[in-house]
Image: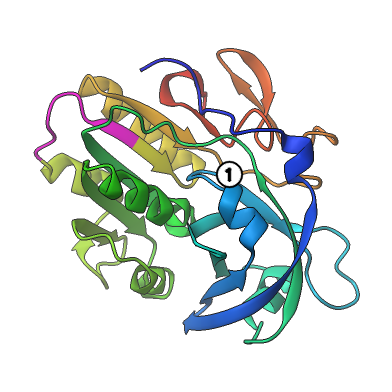
Amino acid sequence: MSGSGQTHGDHRQWAETSHCRVSAARHLGGFAVLELIAPRIARRAAPGQFVMVTVPGEGYLLRRPISLFSAEADRIALLVEARGRGSERLTRLEVGDVVDVAGPLGSVFPTQGVTNALLVGGGIGCAPLQYLADELAVAGAHVTAAFGFRDFRAARAVGAFTIERLSVATEDGSVGRAGTVLHLLAALDVAPGTTVYACGPTPMIAAVQRWTFHEGLRGYVSLEAHMACGTGSCHGCVVDTARGKLRVCSEGPVFRLDEVTP
């Protein structure tokens, strides 16, 4: 494998806003899976990308960046966690509500030629990995996933996923194995040449990076960052990489695992 997360068209064109109607909403504690009718976005989307969602109502100045949880036919799905006022408002959207969504944005997870994949996620960072798992499975790849969460409340998100080979760990032992996602990785029998895909908190990414290098594997990471514009204009999501300072929203969010410095 070579190169970073692949670009997927013209970001400026993708910044066009669509008015999307909520066609389904499922709640899992502090999380919500929102299905939106968004044919233009679904047609152009690929795993690893995200959208910028306008929060309905007054007092919400900035749009919220949210990873694509899935995309199929004329629908996209978003997994949203209530973490602040804006995201909490989004989790309360109901069927029939309309929201403005810009995207798809950002780079994508490279999948060409992948036969064995290990998906590693932490917290809400697991969100883009369902879409990736779906695409890899369609291509005939063997997909294994390991997700880590802090506690039972955070692990409620697992109910949204349909990945067949999925292991879960929680730090308090309330769901799955007691410990972190690194404890899950240590117990896995990973085939040589497996491609690792990771997304989650910075400390987790650093630990997964070390584990991946130790195992002689390569892979990709989707970085999390606060964003204002989502199109690279404001430079508010710049991170240090082996290629210099890059913007998570436009050069990323997907990077090679060996080029980031978490």
| Badge 1 amino acid | Glu
Number of residue marks: 1
User: Could you tell me if residue 231 is visible in this image?
Assistant: no
Residue 129, position as x, y percentages in the image: 40, 51
Q: Majority secondary structure of the magenta segment?
A: loop
Q: Position of residue 45 (x, y in %)?
A: 56, 48
Return the residue nearer the eye: 120 or 134: 134
* Membership of 192 in magenta stretch: yes
Q: Secondary structure at mark 1?
A: loop
In the image, residue 203 lies at what x, y percent?
45, 40
Residue at image point 36% right, 35% down: 207
- Binning the other alpha carbons within 10 Å of mark 1 as few (below 14), some (14 to 19) or many (20 upward) gives many
The residue positioned 28% from the left and 42% from the top of the image is 139
The residue under label 1 is 224
Q: Nearer the viewer, residue 46 or 218?
A: 46
> Would you identify the image quadrant in which residue 140 lies?
top left
The stretch in magenta equals: 189-196
- Percent position of residue 147, x then y: 32, 55
